[in-house]
Amino acid sequence: MLLLKAVALAVRELPEMNGFWIDGAFKPSDAVHAGVAISLRQGGLIAPAIHDVEKKRLDEIMVSLYDLVKRVRAGVLRSSEIADATITVTSLGDQGVETVFGIIYPPQVALVGFGKISERPWASNGLVGAKPVIMGTLAADHRASDGHRGGKRKVDARQRAKRRRIAE
């Protein structure tokens, strides 16, 4: 939930990562509809949308995600949930994968991937210790935005998560 909210807040500030590439042009979205990659029990993957993620509290995102997974597995999604995702968020951390390099699902222009939480050496105030770290990646369609701006917002999302300002 925390990562979905962090991505939603970051792309709200980077509108060229939130929308669609249609008919040779970028069409931005006013809202963040995060496609969440969900594995199907019989095999395969689907990434239906949680609508308006940037406006939801963390507990609302959790309820929406639980409901979405339940309905995916029951095969009762709404057509808007399949077609409306403006950015996809995927995670393979629960499977032990450290880094995810996802493929953008057209007509979307961006995908954010997260791996597992790992302890890494971390220096702070002249001391080195172990700190839990999660690897996040960004796949972006460079027709819509360059990597520099996307990388800057990725850093912003990380800093926001570190400060625990996600619930704002």
Image: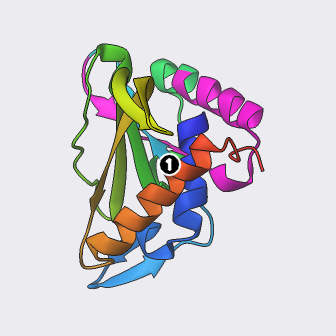
Q: Considering only vertical position in the picture, is 108 above or below 69?
A: below
Picture quadrant where residue 92 is located = top left
Q: Is residue 164 magenta?
A: no
Q: Is residue 58 magenta?
A: yes
Q: Considering only vertical position in the picture, is 112 above or below 68?
A: below
Q: Amino acid at mark 1?
A: Arg
Residue found at x 25% / y 19%? 43
Magenta residues (range): 43-69
Residue found at x 51% / y 39%? 125
Residue 146 spot, x, y in % from top left = 28, 76
Residue 151 spot, x, y in % from top left = 35, 63
Q: Is residue 5 visible?
A: no
In this figure, what is the number of numbered marks? 1
Of residue 74 and residue 141, the one placed in the foreground of this image is 141
Question: Is residue 111 left or right of 80 when viewed as pictured?
Answer: left
Residue occupied by mark 1 = 158
The kind of secondary structure element at disc 1 is helix
